Amino acid sequence: MLDRAHAVRIADAARRAARGLAAGACLPVLAAGACAPARTADTTWVRPPAVAGTFYPGEPAGLERAGRELLAGAVPRRPEPPVALVLPHAGWAFSGQIAADGWAQAAGRPYDVVVILGTNHTAARFDRVAVWPRGGFRTPLGVAPVDTAAAEALIAADPDCVIDEDAHGREHSVEVHVPFAQLALPGTPILPLVVACQDSGRCRRLGRALARILHGRRALVVASSDLSHYPAYDDARASDGAVLAAIASVDPDAFRATIEAQMQAGRPALATCACGEAPVMAALEAARAMGATRGAVLSAANSGDTPIGDRDRVVGYGAVAFYAPSAAPGHSPATTAGAPSAGTPASASHGTPAPLTAAPPEAGLSAEDQARLLAFARLTLQRWFETGVPPLARDLGEAAERPQGAFVTLRIGGELRGCIGHMAPDLPLGQAVGMMALAAALRDPRFPPLEASELERVTIEISALTPLERVAGPEAIVVGRDGVEIRKAGRVAVFLPQVAGEQGWDRTALLENLCLKAGLPRDGWRGGAELWTFRAIHFRETGTR
């Protein structure tokens, strides 16, 4: 269980990573002890974790729980084993679910080695490929052993591949994937590489060298890259959709051409389309040489889709898998015993999101819709306090995909413990609920942040809102039906429709208290104020807490 300070550190570091300010199917049942520390012969080459506790949970139980929950919540897995993956590397609070969507495709399968191609964020003068040659990578789950023979073979096969500890020392793009490898493929050795060379010819040569040294082995190549950096939400979706389609084409030339086209498309604040262009290029070449003829976009999102992100300046994430037309050596096309059953291909909602279509005011929420949203709000808070990695709002039903404002209210023993809302219908309702659940718990200025120990006593209420409509005057307000927002002199305050009834207010008392809440004189509503109304579908958890 995370204490509040640790949870805040995780969120802050993940947010910085996603904003570019930092150095930002089901899992098969595993035997007890599957994540115990591996033993390595050369302890002097065991790389310590650099970003545990910031990019991902730093405490073993919390990390294992977060990883397993992300893998369990992954998109349906396909029957054939992937030969390669392209996955993001931001903090797990932002990109962990998208990364898990890819790792779940490989979970429980009999791979001999996992090659992790990271990008270079920290070694400014290094322009080759840094190989970690032996020993292992340590995480809170233990030590993931390095495939020494593969490392030596790669160094011999490609003149760009050298041993360089400094390039790995603070680099997060490899490290964030190692716990997933430990959970999804326990005991499987890894080959960690930091690909710093930017020349496409050298990157493609690396990919061919990898394919040669891996020939005859059951190998998985994982390229670590986030996508668009720092555009607004809609621009990120457009850029990421084009780049992901190019990656899935398994054509390095198409990938490079698409990046050039997107960078010339005039998208404001777009700094790069893929920070890991070099490892992706190498992985595409390796996948082709290993027999891959097709790719599949498994899922996509950006930091603005998370409960702790914003949509003005985002980083994009995507998961792509590559498949050979027949099973790779040693692989069976069928699912491995004990692994999750094969599912249907990922639904469109897991790929590039469709444009938002505003919900009509009369759109309702069924009892099932309400139950899903309440469960998601509670899951968001539980995951936050337990791991610092909140869930994405997906698979919540069609109603949760409609853009709609929402308030989340928390009560303990009937007493208010937090209430914050998002009025504008510019977010999918499910995402608005997740964001406001965290905001109500942590950022209501009237209360101290919620403690993890309080969560089991909290009752969650949700108000799904119709759009605001300005009214001509107070006489248009129907007490008990209408929520009211007042705007005057740069001050704003709002009451939900149910507040007046709970307090026993008539219209005048409602408006007077609304003025006081906004920091206005009690009678400030009588002149020069804008009054806006809305309605709400209000529902809450049942049962005693």
Image: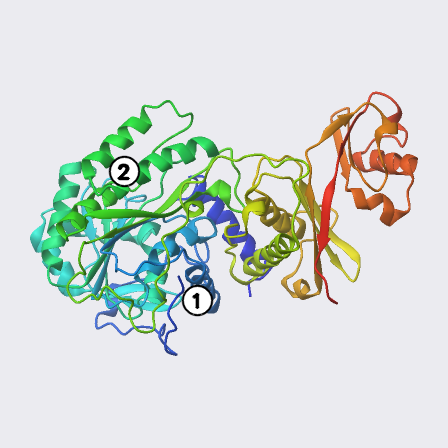
Quarter occupied by residue 489? top right
Which image quarter holds the C terminus? bottom right
Which of these two is toward me, 491 or 98?
A: 98
Q: Secondary structure at mark 1?
A: helix
- In the orientation shown, which residue stands out farthest toward the bottom? 32
The outermost residue toward the left is 156
On the picture, is 431 further left or further right than 61? right
Q: Residue at x 50, y 56 (%)?
A: 389
Read off the residue under disc 2.
246
Residue at point 55% right, 66% down? 1
* Whether residue 274 is visible: no
Instruction: First in sequence, mark 1 or 2: give its number.
Output: 1
Residue shown at the point (54%, 59%) measured from the top left = 383
In this view, the residue in front, 348 or 101, is 348
Which residue is label 1 attached to? 64
- Answer with left or right where residue 207 lies relative to residue 233: left
The answer to whether residue 1 is seen in the rendering is yes
